[in-house]
Image: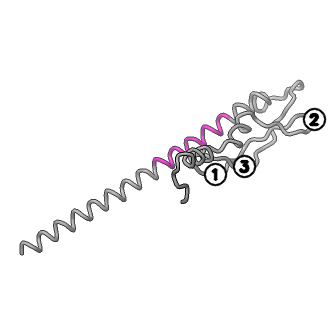
């Protein structure tokens, strides 16, 4: 009888530790998704502010403006260690050429993972997987 109780207690401890591992993974994934979503919201806010600075306020007709809003285009950038899809706002000059927003130009080129991978290779850490 005593052995049976001991096995049962061990089984309950094992399932409790498995639950903690699963819960920890869930919390980590949820936190990661929250950070990525917040980051995307910030990116869109900054891009729209820059577009307003270049084009002027929305729905205002100004003869002296040099650029206008031109919808959105599907683009991608690295955020939170992975490439994410973004509907990037477009701006065009009145003469027809595309205007690249300063923040987008910086964010689209930069890949923080490459720098980290090079740093890891320098110290001798395996970069597989």
Quadrant position of the N terminus in the picture: bottom left
Residue at label 1?
83
Does the stretch in magenta take in 32? yes
Mark 2 neighbour density, 10 Å: few (under 14) some (14–19) many (20 or more): few
Residue for point 21% across, 68% down: 11
Q: Give the mark count.
A: 3
Q: Position of residue 124 (x, y in %)?
A: 52, 50
> Compared to 107, does 20 lie above or below?
below
Q: Which residues are magenta?
A: 31-46
Residue for point 31% across, 60% down: 19
- Looking at marks 3 and 1 on the same chain, the residue that comes earlier in the sequence is marked by 3
How many angstroms separate mark 3 from mark 1 (CA)? 10 Å
Residue for point 37% across, 53% down: 24
Q: Provide the secondary structure element on which disc 2 rests.
A: loop
Q: Nearer the viewer, residue 120 or 88?
A: 120
Which residue appears farthest toward the top when viewing the image? 64
Left or right side of 103 for 92:
right
Task: Between label 2 and label 3, give the one nearer the viewer.
Answer: 3
- In which quadrant of the rendered view does residue 88 lie? top right
Residue at label 2?
95
- Looking at marks 2 and 1 on the same chain, the residue that comes earlier in the sequence is marked by 1
Q: Provide the secondary structure element on which disc 1 rests.
A: strand
């Amino acid at each position: 009888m005593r052995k049976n109780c001991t096995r049962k207690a061990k089984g309950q401890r094992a399932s409790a530790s498995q639950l903690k591992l699963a819960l920890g993974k869930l919390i980590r994934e949820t936190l990661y998704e929250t950070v990525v979503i917040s980051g995307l919201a910030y990116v869109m806010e900054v891009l729209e502010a820059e577009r307003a600075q270049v084009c002027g306020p929305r729905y205002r007709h100004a003869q002296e403006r040099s650029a206008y809003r031109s919808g959105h285009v599907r683009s991608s950038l690295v955020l939170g260690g992975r490439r994410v899809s973004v509907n990037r706002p477009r701006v065009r000059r009145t003469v027809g050429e595309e205007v690249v927003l300063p923040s987008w130009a910086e964010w689209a080129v930069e890949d923080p993972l490459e720098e980290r991978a090079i740093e890891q290779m320098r110290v001798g850490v395996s970069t597989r997987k």
